[in-house]
Image: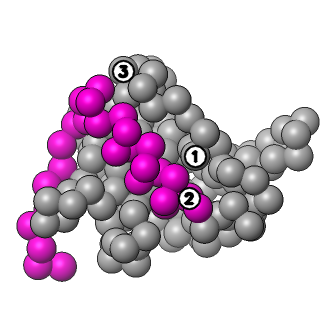
Amino acid sequence: MGEAIELRVARPSDADAIRRLTREAYARWVPVVGREPLPMTADYEVAVRTHRFDLLYVEGALAGLIETVDEGERLLIENVAVAPAFQGQGLGRRLLAHAESIARALGRSRVRLYTNALMATNIALYQRLGYAVDREEHAPDGRRAVHMSKAVAAG
């Protein structure tokens, strides 16, 4: 990938762009899970003020994002999304590695994430990157979340 890549922390004014990218990135999962995945319905005006979002640009175009929440001992990856035009280029892996760097910089020993159990390709990717399944959670509305985590070496 020889394109110019920029990573920057989001500002409140980025909420609309974050919403659009997330909706585009997760749209392919609607037929798989039978409803809009939770990131498609989030209130990004609130989230961008309370969580950290790192935005990844390729040649000036918003290509991906990662949303993280410092939980004290761990860093939660709340959302990782790559625009459909940029999927399959390793940007998701790059964003996950960036979150691990954030965790190390904060002195956190683990990163964690969760995903819908029906998103098998995502689970497989996370496992290839060293994430282990911690537990599966069944919600009353029928959703099944797979919780995963990974140890990160001290920075």
* Residue that appears at 43% across and 49% down: 20
Amino acid type, callout 3: Arg
The residue that disc 1 covers is: 40
Estimate how packed mark 1 is, as few (under 14), some (14 to 19) or many (20 or more) residues with alpha carbons within 10 Å: some
Estimate how packed mark 2 is, as few (under 14), some (14 to 19) or many (20 or more) residues with alpha carbons within 10 Å: some
Q: Which residues are magenta?
A: 1-27
Question: Answer yes or no: do the residues labelled 2 and 3 have beta carbons within 8 Å?
Answer: no
Alpha carbon of mark 2 to alpha carbon of mark 3: how far? 22 Å
State the image coordinates of residue 9 (x, y, percent, origin top left). Answer: 22, 37
Alpha carbon of mark 3 to alpha carbon of mark 1: how far? 17 Å
The residue that disc 3 covers is: 49
Quarter of the figure with the C terminus: top left
Q: Which of disc 3 and disc 2 is earlier in sequence? A: 2
Q: Nearer the viewer, residue 24 or 153?
A: 24
Q: Is residue 59 visible?
A: yes
Amino acid type, callout 2: Tyr
* Residue that appears at 18% across and 43% down: 8
Instruction: Inspect the magenta stretch and tell me whether residue 121 lies in it.
Output: no
Quarter of the figure with the N terminus: bottom left
Residue 26, labelled with which disc? 2
Q: Nearer the viewer, residue 6 or 30?
A: 30
State the image coordinates of residue 74 (x, y, percent, origin top left). Answer: 47, 31
